[in-house]
Image: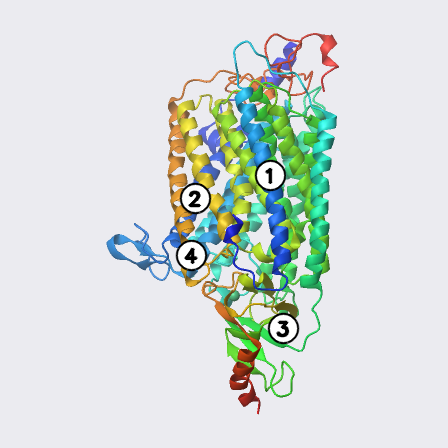
């Protein structure tokens, strides 16, 4: 099943994926165990002439066992999830690379700081739907929406964050492989929701400098 | 067993009721239960057809649907040979109304309305509900809410198209969806529906607390009654929150308030908090009755006491209690403080434990049984199988980091269809099982088995591959998956799913045919065709208004199958076999 996972090109994606795999193995094993037992019981204990069902109201020891074991597994799983979650969502590593993404029906407005080096000023350099970043660089995203809730989703980066009108939400990613990655909106946002998408272009450091020189610098002057 | 009890119990003095008071404005809980069933089945057909249209669009985007050309533009665009092409706006309305109808107008009316009404008084040995007039009012307000919801298909702009979750701000301003009255009516219909459910809930709670037959202690109640009782308490506490949120949304849309609109100082996430504070208990409102019914059926057809009765009752109570503190798991990536996400992950992992207990105890019930694979039993087992998958897939979403990726993808669509659409198996189990008591005739078992096999195979064919799509990142609620390069390689799965769904839909004709044929021409039913213990089978078939000829006295719990005290392998709750045994069983 997990072979359908898109290629992971982010620095933190493997942590998500390994939890994904772990839960997959645990649940698959549980599924097989319960299903096999169920089918076995259905065959072995099918109605047969002359045999009477066992008169039994339960077994406290067994019930304690199958309460404690799932509880222990689930508690361990949640503690394993805490640190990855905190790393991705609760903190943004220090960085000098910031962009602003403003969602609106049905586009991503992308803004880079202009000559003043600040976002949200008049000299911001703006693009529609295309984000360009260098590899191995922490990208801090200022995520906004002007109308309804959208969701900024980059499957290859295991990145998803809703954009909520009235708020600026900070999020981050760091890509480690150059390429062009699709950037769909993942939250229903109206009749044009389907097809609301952009592209993330991850460049090598040199390519990014070339792109920035051509697209960011001239407008900033 | 005195003479006066006979006269009292049978309500024999009733005058022959008129057609209207018997079939339309009935005060008899059994008839009200049947009314909910017919309305629910009608809505099931409508909700199912909407789902087929959604699936058509996903498999063959923007190709004409045969026979849909009669609907005018801009709702449907004409194609060749009378076909009609679904535009994006209509597509959004289709999935919005599919979910709304299935949840509020199919599963709730049937699982809670029909079986709550029909079974609670019969199973606890009562003559009727505590408040028969309130019961009638509950049905009729519910029916009106259904009419209001369906009428939204015919207003300019079409029905609501903001998803069944109605997230603000999309739902809070007509300009964002282009839907004006459709969304108003959606809100009004759900408020009415809530009032209907609230009246039902008050009735169920009062009836269970006050009207149990002599000897029917709480811990002698069948788990079906336990589940409906807990469901009613959840309804009573959860619905006011939804109603308040809906009222605020309606004010934002019609009265210029800004509860959810940031430009007026409001907060879009407030809607999500209120909606899911209702919404997560709602999931258990839907699934608990299915669990209760499944428990009863597994015990009856294994001819064996339920494994761990008290654990089963307490796990439902635990689920109900915990259901109030898990709502934030719907909001991990909503922009809510991520620290809250961690807390909600913990509570969500904890709520999985009582669900696991239930599955293992069901297995324990099968162990050592003498299993009769009747049609209701097959469907009950189908419910267990679906709930197992749906429960396990929930663990993926509960883990906050994994949820970052699979939130709002087809993985969650697969998950909640295994849980909520999986309830349909318990629903069918219950209809096949209680049909002889409800309609005095038996349904055809062979047709029932064909119905089960087809439904089981194509249900899994329709919903299991959705996990693969979700793992691939396929978003939910998109109109055309072929607009995305990363989804296009998985498109064969979308076609496979749609074929499965279409065949799943067509397979239901075996049920409908069997149901209506049996209604009029089925074999006459015996009083207790399944040799079951619970009190409804002690009532005569047909049960009169007032249910029991004499008020039953309960001597034992409902699961005394294969008891060594009797030669038969069942021992009804109200059967007096001498004082020595009465005290022992719970
Ligand atoms: Cu969007
Ligand atoms: Cu939930």
Same-chain status of marks 3 and 1: yes
Q: Horizontally, is A107 left or right of B565 in the view?
A: left
In this view, the residue in front, B175 or B47, is: B47
| Visible residue check, residue B389 | yes
- Identify whether A138 is placed above or below B493: below
Please rate how many residues cluster around mark 4, counting C-alpha atoms within 10 Å: few if below 14, some from 14 to 19, many from 20: few
Q: What element carries label 2?
A: helix
Cβ–Cβ below 8 Å for labels 2 and 3?
A: no
Q: Which label lies toward us, 4 or 2?
A: 4
* Label drawn at residue B48: 2
Q: On what subunit does the disc labeled 4 rest?
A: B
| Visible residue check, residue B133 | no
* Label drawn at residue B489: 4
Task: Name the spot of residue B470 as percent of width and height, x first.
Answer: 52, 52
Same-chain status of marks 4 and 3: no
- Ranked by sequence position, the earlier of labels 3 and 1 is 1
Give the residue at mark 1: A29
Cβ–Cβ below 8 Å for labels 4 and 2?
A: no
- Ranked by sequence position, the earlier of labels 4 and 2 is 2
Task: Name the spot of residue B426 as percent of width and height, x first.
Answer: 53, 33
Give the residue at mark 3: A137
- Identify whether B293 is placed above or below A105: above
Q: What element carries label 1?
A: helix
Q: On what subunit does the disc labeled 2 rest?
A: B
Cβ–Cβ below 8 Å for labels 1 and 4?
A: no
Same-chain status of marks 4 and 2: yes
Alpha-carbon distance for marks 1 and 4? 29 Å
Quarter occupied by residue B260: bottom right
- Identify whether B8 is placed above or below B579: below
Alpha-carbon distance for marks 1 and 2? 33 Å
- Identify whether B192 is placed above or below B85: above
């Amino acid at each position: 099943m997990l072979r359908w996972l898109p290629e992971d090109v982010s620095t933190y994606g493997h942590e998500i994926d390994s939890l994904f795999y772990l839960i997959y193995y645990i649940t698959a094993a549980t599924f097989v165990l319960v299903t096999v037992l169920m089918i076995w019981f259905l065959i072995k204990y099918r109605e047969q002439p002359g045999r009477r069902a066992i008169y039994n109201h339960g077994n406290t020891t067994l019930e304690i066992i199958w309460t404690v074991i799932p509880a222990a597994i689930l508690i361990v799983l949640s503690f394993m999830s805490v640190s990855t979650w905190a790393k991705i969502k609760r903190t943004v590593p220090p960085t000098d690379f910031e962009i602003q993404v403003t969602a609106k029906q049905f586009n991503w407005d992308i803004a880079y700081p202009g000559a003043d080096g600040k976002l949200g000023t008049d000299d911001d350099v703006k693009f529609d739907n295309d984000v360009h970043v260098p590899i191995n660089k922490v990208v801090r995203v200022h995520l906004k929406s002007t109308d309804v809730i959208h969701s900024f989703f980059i499957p290859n980066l295991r990145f998803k964050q809703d954009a909520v009108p009235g708020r600026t939400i900070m999020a981050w990613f760091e890509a480690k492989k150059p390429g062009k990655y699709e950037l769909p909106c993942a939250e229903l946002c109206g009749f044009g929701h389907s097809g609301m998408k952009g592209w993330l272009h991850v460049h090598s450091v040199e390519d990014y400098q070339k792109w920035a020189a051509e697209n960011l610098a001239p407008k900033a002057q | 067993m005195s003479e006066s009890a006979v006269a009292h119990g049978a309500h024999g003095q009733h005058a022959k009721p008129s057609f209207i008071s018997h079939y339309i404005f009935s005060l008899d809980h059994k008839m009200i239960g049947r009314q909910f069933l017919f309305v629910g089945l009608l809505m099931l057909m409508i909700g199912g057809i909407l789902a087929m249209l959604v699936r058509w669009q996903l498999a063959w985007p923007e190709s004409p649907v045969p026979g849909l050309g009669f609907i005018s533009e801009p709702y449907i665009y004409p194609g060749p040979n009378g076909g009609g092409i679904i535009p994006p706006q209509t597509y959004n309305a289709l999935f919005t109304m599919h979910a709304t109808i299935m949840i509020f107008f199919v599963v709730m009316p049937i699982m809670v309305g029909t079986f709550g009404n029909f079974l609670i008084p019969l199973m606890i040995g009562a003559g009727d509900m505590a408040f028969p007039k309130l019961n009638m009012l509950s049905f009729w307000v519910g029916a009106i809410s259904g009419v209001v919801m369906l009428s939204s298909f015919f207003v300019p702009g079409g029905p609501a198209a903001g998803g069944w979750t109605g997230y603000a701000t999309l739902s809070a301003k007509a300009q964002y969806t282009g839907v004006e009255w459709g969304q108003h009516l959606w809100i009004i219909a759900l408020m009415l529906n809530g009032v209907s459910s609230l009246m039902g809930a008050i009735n169920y709670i009062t009836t269970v607390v006050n009207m149990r037959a002599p000897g029917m202690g709480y811990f002698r109640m069948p788990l079906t009654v336990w589940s409906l009782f807990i469901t009613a308490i959840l309804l009573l506490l959860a619905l006011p929150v939804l109603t308040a949120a809906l009222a605020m949304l309606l004010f934002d849309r019609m009265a210029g308030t800004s509860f959810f609109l940031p430009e007026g100082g409001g907060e879009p996430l407030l809607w999500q908090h209120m909606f899911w504070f209702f919404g997560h208990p709602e999931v258990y409102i839907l699934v608990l009755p299915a669990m209760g019914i499944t428990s009863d059926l597994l015990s009856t057809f294994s001819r064996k006491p339920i494994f761990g009765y008290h654990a089963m009752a307490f796990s439902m109570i635990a689920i109900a209690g915990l259901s109030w503190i898990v709502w934030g798991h719907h909001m991990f990536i909503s922009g809510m403080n991520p620290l809250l996400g961690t807390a909600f992950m913990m509570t969500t992992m904890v709520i999985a434990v009582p669900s696991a207990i239930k599955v293992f105890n069901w297995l324990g019930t099968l162990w050592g049984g003498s299993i009769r694979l009747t049609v209701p039993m097959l469907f009950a087992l189908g419910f267990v199988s679906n709930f197992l998958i749906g429960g396990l897939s929930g663990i993926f979403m509960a883990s906050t980091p994994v949820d970052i990726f699979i939130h709002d993808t087809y993985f969650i669509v697969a998950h909640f269809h295994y849980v909520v659409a999986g309830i349909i198996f318990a629903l069918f189990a219950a209809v096949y099982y209680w049909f002889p008591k409800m309609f005095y005739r038996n349904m055809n078992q062979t047709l029932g088995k064909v119905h089960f096999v087809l439904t089981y195979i194509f249900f899994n064919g329709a919903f299991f591959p959705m996990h693969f799509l979700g793992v691939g990142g396929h978003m939910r609620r998109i109109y055309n998956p072929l607009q995305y390069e990363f989804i296009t390689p998985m498109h064969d799965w979308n076609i496979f799913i749609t074929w499965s769904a279409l065949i799943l839909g067509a397979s239901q004709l075996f049920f409908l045919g069997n149901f209506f044929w049996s209604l009029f021409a089925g074999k006459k039913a015996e009083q207790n065709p399944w040799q079951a213990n619970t009190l409804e089978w002690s009532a005569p078939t047909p049960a009169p208004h007032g249910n029991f000829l004499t008020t039953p006295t309960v001597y034992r719990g409902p699961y005394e199958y294969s008891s060594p005290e009797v030669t038969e392998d069942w021992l009804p709750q109200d059967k007096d076999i001498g004082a020595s045994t009465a005290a022992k069983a719970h």
